[in-house]
Amino acid sequence: MSSISICDLVAVRARHPEAIAEAAARRARRPLVGESGRLMIVAADHPARGALGVGGSELAMADRAELLERLTLALSRPGVDGVLATADILEDLLLLGALENKIVMGSMNRGGLAGATYELDDRFTGYRAQDIERLRFDAGKALVRIDYGDAGSLATLHSTARAVDDMAERRLPVFIEPFISRRVEGKVRNDLSAEAVARSIAIASGLGGTSAYSWLKLPVAEDPDDMAWVCGTSTLPVVLLGGETNGDQEGAYEKWRTALRMPTVRGLVVGRSLLYPADGDVAGAVDTAVGLL
């Protein structure tokens, strides 16, 4: 699928690393929320947490050239506002010129590696607030998984609160992605019941010394009809995360369509289900998701 030249990107990185900062400095920017009041963001921060699998393929996202090809295609589609990723991917996209007039969201905590014993002590190993400001990016994102039986969650909550403060000090939005989680046979599982999602909203909304620049990035509850009262747990603006479709792309679209009717919901942040759809049609999947908005 790929026509992206990894050799060219590596050559620039090896010979002219300053080109990344130069590209960031001249990048054309836009407001976070445009005239439509909606956001459509493509997510690609999974690899930095060691989560490379899509569907039945454990290493689907390991091919960087193919991932960049899919991302540049998605970003070129009408109605796509921007991208969420870690530094390595965003810098590749900068060098490719794919981030002009797009929202650029830096992924901040990726230390909770998938499957690790310390997974819920999710350290901020990615972007810091000062990095996002320096590079003239537009927002940050923090993952907060809360397991009442794992002390690592407290460290994640504390560091996220301080990140909220740091971002607000710079008047930069931060998208908080909260879950109530637990370990099942050693693996972290997120509870998507309406009660758990509501509880996670309440906890995330109270992080930091101000919520003025905080957004929520939420999963759709198991019963999408419950989202009406679930989203009423907070007045913070919400974007919905895509999550795994388990092969049921149409079912996912219907869940998003139902939840997007809620007054606090402002858009979608979707990753693997759009970049690696079951039928391979990235443009078609992205266009359908944009149509839901």
Image (spheres, grey):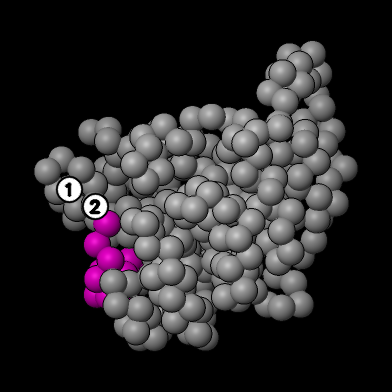
Q: From this viewpoint, is residue 24 visible?
A: no
Q: In this view, does 238 lie to the left or right of 178?
A: right
Mark 1 = which residue?
183
Residue 101's place in the image compared with 116, above or below, is below
Label 2: element kind: strand
Q: From this viewpoint, is residue 202 visible?
A: yes
- The residue most toward the top is 15
Q: Which amino acid type is shown beneath numbered disc 1? A: Arg
First reached walking from the N terminus: tag 2 or tag 1: 1
User: How far apart in space, not on screen, are marks 2 and 1 (Cα)?
Assistant: 6 Å
Residue at figure coordinates x 51%, y 72% from the top left: 238
Give the percent coordinates (x, y) of residue 281.
57, 53
Q: Which amino acid type is shown beneath numbered disc 2? A: Arg
First to last magenta residue range = 190-201
Q: In this view, does 246 lie to the left or right of 163?
A: left
- The residue most toward the left is 185
Residue at figure coordinates x 75%, y 47% from the top left: 99
Give the percent coordinates (x, y) of residue 136.
76, 47
Q: Is 197 colored magenta in this rendering?
A: yes
Q: Is 37 colored magenta in this rendering?
A: no
Asked whether the beta carbons under mark 2 and mark 1 sit within 8 Å of each other, the answer is yes
Nearer to me, 247 or 49: 247
Specify the label residue 189 is tagged with: 2
Secondary structure of the magenta portion, mostly?
helix
Specify the label residue 75 is tagged with: none
Q: Is residue 197 left or right of residue 111?
A: left
